[in-house]
Amino acid sequence: MAARRSLGRSFGWLWASYAVSAYGSALGFGALPLIAVLVLDASPAQVSALSAVGPAVGALIALPLGPWVEFRRKRPVMIGMDLARFAVMMTIPVAYAFGRLSFVQLLVVSAVVAAAKIAFGAASGAYLKALVRPDDLLVANARFESTTWSSIAVGPPLGGAAIGLFGPVTTVVADALSYLLSALGVTAIRGWEEPPRRTDRSRVRAGELLDGWRHLLAHPGLRALYLNQLLVSGLIMATEPLLAVLLLRQLGFPPWQYGLAFAAPCLGGLIGSRLARRVVARYGQHRILRTVGTLRAVWLIGLAFVQPGVAGLATVIAVELAIIISMSLYNPVLATYRLEHTPRDRIARTLSAWSISSSAAIAVLSALGGLLAAVTSPRTAITVAGLLILASPLLLPRRLDSAPVPDRELAAAGVRQPAAGGSPEAG
């Protein structure tokens, strides 16, 4: 059984660190917009800006962090990013206690947290590849995926209850403490990590800022999967605020039903992630990426037909369940392929480029969806998103290398290696 397979004590600490921060973030889901409304009496335009501008600025800040992370030991970077998020998040309850909380502070916190998240993800991805054996990468990624969905299933409802009982900054404190606990967990990982061989560590070359995108666009399989993922994730995320307006304002769903419609299907993430290793072993990586990558695109259009009442609630739960099962099966397979086909001295920059692009795609498509909904209606905008996503399987690769490509073959295929190469990060 994949779920019982031991990946070692070091991976156990890394997984525990990820789990505690994931559950903390789930508890604090939507906390900053909520504080902006309840404490600062922010306008709808300000709340929208907080949700879009903060992560966008964070992505810009993260742009030079990819090369910076690449040529440093990954564990100290992960610890540093966790501590940075703990420190900046704790400024909110402190400012709230002294009556000095401001909207600008929320924007700054949102941007710093977004940038640190991208840098942490880049470092942890590179560290994971060195920490576990190649044939265990899918198992490890599936465990991270199952943790993500289980935290989303239980975190927001508990966070909402905590805010109602203890006040608006309660979940922010919980989220901040989760980063501190995550840093302690990463610190507990034992073993020597080989430093990258680059000698000029104080300066990031301008050309290195784009090396992650160069690798993604030069590798045929990754290029197709990358473009497909940008479209699919952007369109799915763009429908979330539209669906909130449709369900709560136009169809009259009570808040508890709205929360149930999104929390209950997240349990499907446990199903898909647990199936990942077995179905890949039986059908192969390429077939799963193409088949499940296609399946995850066919369900979204169902949200355009939601009606009031119990039938409408059941429709939302069924559609979201199908999407989440497909995504939770697809995501660890995609993450494993991405690590397998990226040189170790390019992982941090590649993962940073992927995350930055995803944030940009979600922001752009969400803005376009909002404009379309304002001109027409939320249901029409959801319908358009559901139709557009049906074309996304055309971007999936028709053929896919099943074996990892050695670094020397990547270089021979035209993927430019950095002038001063890195070395594998040993856990």
Image (cartoon, helix red, strand yellow):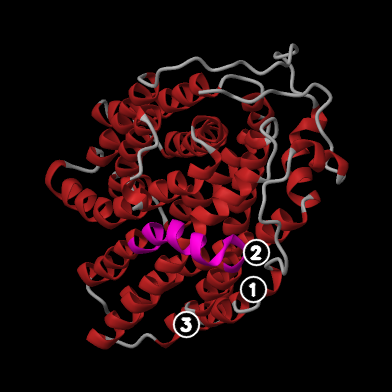
Q: Nearer the viewer, mark 3 or mark 1?
A: 1
The amino acid sitting under disc 3 is Arg
Q: In the image, is residue 215 part of the stretch drawn in magenta?
A: no
Q: Which residues are magenta?
A: 271-287
Mark with earlier residue (3, 2): 2
Residue linked to disc 2? 228
Image point (55%, 47%), residue name: 53
Residue 195 in the image: above or below residue 290: above
Disc 1 residue type (three-letter)? Pro
- Sequence-wise, the earlier of marks 2 and 1 is 2
Amino acid marked by disc 2: Asn
Q: Is residue 275 magenta?
A: yes
Q: Is residue 392 left or right of residue 123?
A: right
Residue at image mark 1: 393
Is mark 2 in CB contact (under 8 Å) with mark 1?
Answer: yes
Circle 3 sits on which residue?
379
How many C-alpha atoms fall within 10 Å of the one at disc 3: few (<14), some, or many (≥20)? many
Q: In which quarter of the view is residue 9 placed?
A: top left
Q: Are marks 3 and 1 in contact (CB under 8 Å)?
A: no
Local secondary structure at mark 1: helix
